[in-house]
Image (tube, rainbow, N blue to C red):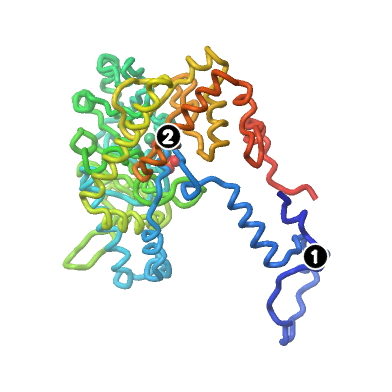
């Protein structure tokens, strides 16, 4: 496909404005260009076709199956986009007086109430712009809590090795020392190792539950109790709430603070670099430390307030507000039952695929999974030389976006599959058939898979080179 600069024809254009019929003021010489800007010269038709062709080359949920583990690439109802695009939400200014923005404040207030109900928390901030940003904010709350109590020796955060990669990174960013504890063979936290790790220096525990191998830790109540008994607080990475929303609540599992990814679970598409939102909910004991402003209701009027011991702002104004509008529209259209059903179907779809593939592919953990499951291609690689990467490339030829690869690190040759609740049984069956066919190909004709993809616009790329030395500009 040609770049716009390569299709440019001198003299072509699409200006539809009439010639200027008012005097053009003279600009100072020093501010004028010496040479016309180097822009592609194309008709509107050329431009439209160019972008339409480009769009056809990307893969999204609207094109096909996208089982990218730990990312919740689900279909999001367009009605929620329409709600977020209402002029009453998009045409307001963040510095408007409160009494003129009561509707927008009601959205923040109601979404906070709904998400606190779903998570079992007491208060919430919508400032963080992403999941990792929420983790950082939540950890600052924990830090502020210990500091306020004069408990300054609590400098360590315990992070199981089945946590999402952002967890240890956020803890380090927040100034804590990370203590990593290994998982047991069944993928759950090793309680003995946890008991040995906690002490007077424990600020808290950060847990991803369901964890990155797709399992719900069955000892969750014991885990949070061990940390509380040692004087620490419990942080719940709720980015993958899709698996448990409406069924179980972090607040009931003994967690004090949680972040959610509205751009995974609550109707904002994940990926593409669009705005996200990683609200942080907390128990009452941490509410005085939340970033400000938060919305309070007083005699039927909404007001902004900054909590007394606030850690300060973590983002400008109120976070990515329209993402919150989409979340509220989603929650209200789904209702309590719909939310629960979405979680149940997410878990059902993952287990269906896992069972159908389990007889052939090697599952990293042969237990009932939550919203995703992890396979290890290590045995297949030993036998045939076909790696997780080769299977992923083979999927591309079949119009399927690959699962998350080589993550979690505790599983070798990992493929992590998250089908999500919005896929039909027919789509799952098709994907299962593709996975099984690729397995056959691995055994019979491995070279075909080593050479895959065959039918994509570009073949195998130098992925390290693309990341380290990206070519983002046209060399004129
Ligand atoms: C996606 C994810 C995150 C990070 O969220 P971002 O919005 O990408 O920063 C953190 N934890 C888990 C478990 C996730 O799946």
Q: Where 318 sits versus 436, above or below? A: below
Q: Disc 1 marks which residue?
A: 36
Q: Taking 270 as reference, is 47 left or right?
A: right
Local crowd size for mark 2, using a 10 Å CA cut-off: few (<14), some (14–19), many (≥20): many
Q: Position of residue 25 (x, y in %)?
A: 74, 81
Q: Position of residue 96 (x, y in %)?
A: 38, 70
Q: Disc 2 marks which residue?
A: 69
Q: Nearer the viewer, residue 425 or 219?
A: 425
Q: How many marks?
A: 2
Instruction: Identify the residue at horizontal 68%, vertical 67% (top origin).
Output: 44
- Quadrant of residue 321 within the rendered picture: bottom left
Can you see residue 84? yes
Q: Regarding mark 2 in the picture, which secondary structure is present there?
A: loop
Q: Where 9 sits versus 386, above or below? A: below
Q: Position of residue 162 (x, y in %)?
A: 37, 25
Q: Position of residue 388 (x, y in %)?
A: 52, 24
Q: Where 33 sits versus 476, above or below? A: below
Q: Nearer the viewer, residue 243 or 434?
A: 434
Can you see residue 132? no
Q: Taking 31 as reference, is 422 left or right?
A: left
Whole-number angstrom distance, CA of label 2 to CA of label 1: 48 Å
Circle 2/circle 1 CB separation < 8 Å: no
Instruction: Identify the residue at horizontal 26%, vertical 32% (top origin).
Output: 234
């Amino acid at each position: 496909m040609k770049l716009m600069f390569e299709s440019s024809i001198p003299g072509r254009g699409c200006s539809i404005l009439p010639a200027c019929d008012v005097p053009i003021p003279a600009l100072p010489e020093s501010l004028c260009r010496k040479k016309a800007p180097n822009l592609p010269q194309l008709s509107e038709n050329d431009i439209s076709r160019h972008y339409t062709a480009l769009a056809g080359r990307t893969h999204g949920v609207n094109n096909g199956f996208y089982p990218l583990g730990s990312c919740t690439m689900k279909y999001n109802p367009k009605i929620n986009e329409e709600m977020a695009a209402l002029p009453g939400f998009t045409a307001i200014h963040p510095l408007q007086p409160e009494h003129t923005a009561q509707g927008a404040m009601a959205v923040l207030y109601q979404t906070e109430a709904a998400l606190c109900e779903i998570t079992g928390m007491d208060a919430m901030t919508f400032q963080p712009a992403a999941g990792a940003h929420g983790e950082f904010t939540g950890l600052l709350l924990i830090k502020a809590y210990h500091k306020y109590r004069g408990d300054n020796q609590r400098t360590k955060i315990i992070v199981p090795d089945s946590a999402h990669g952002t967890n240890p990174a956020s803890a380090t960013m927040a100034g804590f020392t990370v203590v990593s504890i290994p998982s047991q063979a069944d993928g759950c936290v090793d309680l003995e190792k946890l008991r040995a790790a906690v002490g007077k220096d424990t600020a808290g525990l950060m847990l991803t539950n369901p964890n990155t191998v797709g399992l719900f830790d069955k000892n969750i109540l014991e885990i949070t109790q061990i940390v509380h008994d040692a004087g620490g607080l419990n942080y719940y990475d709720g980015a993958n709430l899709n698996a448990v929303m409406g069924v179980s609540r972090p607040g009931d599992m003994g967690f004090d603070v949680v972040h959610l990814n509205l751009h995974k679970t609550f109707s904002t598409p994940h990926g593409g670099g669009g705005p996200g939102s990683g609200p942080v909910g907390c128990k009452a004991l941490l509410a005085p430390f939340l970033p400000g402003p938060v919305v309070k209701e007083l005699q039927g009027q909404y007001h902004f307030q900054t909590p007394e011991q606030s850690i300060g702002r973590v983002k400008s104004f109120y976070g990515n507000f329209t993402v919150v509008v989409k979340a509220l529209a989603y929650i209200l259209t789904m209702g309590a039952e719909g939310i629960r059903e979405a979680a149940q179907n997410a878990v059902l779809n993952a287990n269906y695929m896992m069972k159908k593939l389990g007889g052939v592919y090697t599952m990293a953990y042969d237990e009932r999974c939550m919203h995703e499951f992890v396979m290890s291609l290590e045995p297949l690689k030993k036998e045939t030389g076909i790696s997780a990467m080769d299977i992923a490339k083979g999927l591309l030829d079949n119009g399927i976006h690959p699962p998350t690869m080589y993550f979690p690190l505790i599983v070798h040759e990992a493929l992590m599959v998250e089908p999500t609740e919005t896929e039909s049984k027919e789509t799952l069956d098709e994907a299962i058939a593709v996975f099984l066919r690729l397995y056959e190909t691995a055994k019979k004709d491995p070279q075909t898979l080593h050479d895959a993809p065959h039918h994509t616009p570009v073949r195998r790329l130098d992925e390290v080179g693309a990341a380290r030395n990206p070519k983002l500009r046209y060399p004129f």
